[in-house]
Every structure is written in C-alpha cells, then in structure tokens.
Amino acid sequence: MRIFELLAEGYPDTISAFNQAAAPELVKKTVDQYRALVNRNQVQGDERNIDWWKLQGWEKFARFVADKIQQPSPTQVKRGRAQGQSIILKETPKWLVVIPLDHDASCFHGRDSDWCTARPNSHYFDEYFLDREVNLIYCINKESGLKYAIASHPSLSEMELFDQADKSMTAGQFQVATGFNPQQLVTLIPQNDSRIAQARQTRRDLLSRIQKRMKVWSQNPRQLPDLERELIEARNSDAAAYYIIVLGQHRNGQLKFPNALSMMAVRSDLEGPFFESLMDLDDDLELSTDDYPLNYIYEPSRAVQLASVRNSAFTIKAIRNPSAEVQMAAVVKNGWALTWITNPSLEVQMAAVRQDPRAIEFIKNPALEVQMAAVQGNGRAIRYITDPSAEVQMAAVQEELGAIKYIKNPSPEVTALARSKGLKI
C-alpha cells in the first residue's frame, strides 16, 4: 500500500524532474527531509502534495524544505525544544555553521555557551539582530560540542569573534580553532536572500504591535489574557516585566499570572531599548531597585522562584519562606543573599561563603568549618569572626598575610609566621 501511495503521489516523476536541476544526492536528501516533515504533520494544504511542488520547481522546493526543517514539530513545541528559524550557512561532516533568525534559534544553537544572545528571555538577541542589524553566525563542532560565534556588523568589515565562554578572539585564533577564515564565512551570508530581512521585519512588527497595544492598555491597566498570550509569544522579558509591574503598582495587590509569563518577567534585567520605550508609556510608573516583578506575582511557583533568584539573588527577599533549594540557588548566585535568609542550614552557609567569603558577616555563631571555608577563600574575612580560634587565625594569615591586622591578640604561632614572612609587628 505504501509503495502504491508513493507512486500515486508522483514522487518518482518529481524526483526525476528535480534531478535535472540539482545533484541527485542532494535531491534525495531534500526529498527525504520533506517526507519526514509530512510524517510529522509540519506541512499543510497543497504543500503536502509532491505533484504541486513539481510545478513550483526545484529552487522553491529546496528553499521551503530548508526553512521548514528548522522549525519545531508540534511534539518539539510541547517538550520545549523549539529550534526556531535559522539559515544553514555551511555544513561539513564536522561542523554546522548557522545564522539564527530569531531568539529561539539563538538559544537552541547557542545552548551551553555563555553568549548573552543565547540566554532565554533576555533582550540581547533583539539588541544585536534588530537594533544594530548584526548578523550572528554560530559555528558548532558536531563531534566535540565546542561552539564559536561571529557578530558581523552591517559594514561587513567590522566583526566580533567569541569562543564558547564568550571570550573575545582574534581572527587567527578563530581560524586555528575552527579551520574557517571568519571573513570568508561572513562573505557567505546571502546578500539577496530575503529571509534575514523578513525575519527582522516580522519581529519588529510583533514588538511594534505589542507596544501599541500596551500604550492603550497602560491607560487602564487590567489583566488581558489575549495580551498575555501575545507577550508570551514575543518572548520579551522586559515587556513581560513591565506588564506585571504596572499591574502590581496600579492595582495595589498581588495577582496570578501564567507561569510562562512570570518566568520571562523574573528573568528581566529591567533595561534595554525596548524596556525604556515601554517606560515612556506610563508617566506615573516609578521604579526603584526593589521593583522586581516577583513582588507582584501571587504565590510564585517553584520554577518562577528559582528563575528569579538565579537571575538576581536578592529577589529572595520577596519570597516568603524560601525552600532550601531556592536558598541554595540564591547564595550560589551571590553569597550576600544570606542577608535575607533566616536560620540558613550549614550547607547553605557553606555555599554562601564559598561564593563570597565576606558573607560570613551575616551568619550568627558560624561553625568552625564555615569559618575555615571563609578565611581560606579570603583571609581578610576574619574581621567578621568574633574570637577566632588559633586554627582559624593561622588559616587566615596563610591565605593573606595582611589579615593579621584584623586579629585581636593573635596567637604566638600566627605572630611567628607573620614575622618569618617579614611583617613587622
């Protein structure tokens, strides 16, 4: 039955026609990808009919498949594995070189990197791709997973190169690492390809539509489910944060919001051109350093709490009775978050002083192991320890000789050590 269906759909005739326009192996690969798209229900209407594509011609068919294969299937969307839209600039058995056309693609291909443009719900991709019209090129090693990025500016003569840890590279270092001349990769960017311009315009249209809607909405702030859905679709953390903060300030109370919207909002840095343009819509809105979106979310979920403290550790002060998991996430981000944690466990105390030894100042009667961890990380942290033992004194001075000036009545062993190092006491 399957063979009959394929024959009836005209695959052999279409493949034969396409073979006249392109290499047979490329045609076969593209047709196989097309069949997979059909089987995953990612193709609808006439586009499911191979005979229809025969009439459109090889170039349109190949372009359609190349674009469509980048889009997530319904199953991938459900699982949160959206690949977004991108252009494959070059592919070898070892390397995949892509241009992300949206934030989803940037996060998908840039995952496990420290690139700001690959952070979920951040404004940096828009800042590069839209505001500065920079084309990003991600080079991904299929074998090792190592990644490198090029930020190609509109002039084409200006570019920035980064390794996976977001450290700047020279063109020579980039070529040694990847085998590619970065300037030659930039010249591969299709100048007459409308996909890049269309992606920018589509994104600009969406953000413009949201801004216009929010300008009207800000005159009478209230919860609008359809606006919330559009904000989630836009994946702009600043817009989500603005929506929640405005509602919180105008309605004088905490409200429930969709989890996806809350997750985006708490990851906002409350900065960037789009956020500033939204602020202009509401002259009455006044933000302080304490205006975290988390302040206005009623009973934030565990995931929202974790996302918030991982973005800004000090937002833990807006969480009632934070769990041990949330406490740990906060102090790992910034040890000083301990200021707002009541009765932290030994594990949380240790994590805090390891992140910042000075956080021991906020611990009442720290255990010996906490004191040792603090002074071994920074000897001068001993200034925050009352009556340190001889063992702690010695560890502090061994880490930092100058720490002795913060010790009242140093032990004879510590004094001797300092003098042996040439310190006059």
Image (cartoon, grey):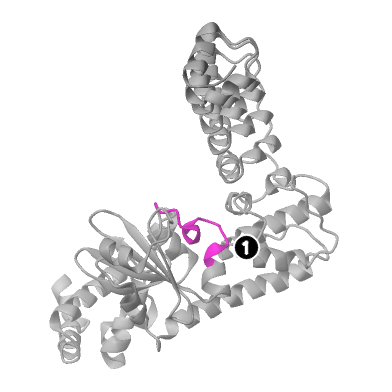
Q: Is 362 inside the magenta-drawn segment?
A: no
Relative side of 15 to 60, left or right: left
Q: Is residue 9 above or below residue 179?
A: below
The local crowd at label 1, few if under 14, some if 14 to 19, many if 20 or more residues have their Cα within 10 Å, is many
Picture residue at 20% right of the left edge, 87% below the top: 14
Relative side of 303 to 300, left or right: left
Q: Does the image show residue 392?
A: no
Three-letter amino acid code at disc 1? Leu
- In this figure, which residue is indicated by the disc labeled 1? 231
Front-most of 353 and 197?
A: 353
Relative side of 43 to 386, left or right: left
Q: Position of residue 42 (x, y in %)?
A: 37, 70
Q: Position of residue 54 (x, y in %)?
A: 26, 89
Magenta span covers which residues? 112-125
Q: Does the image show residue 131?
A: yes
Q: Position of residue 76 (x, y in %)?
A: 39, 58
Q: Is 119 inside the magenta-drawn segment?
A: yes
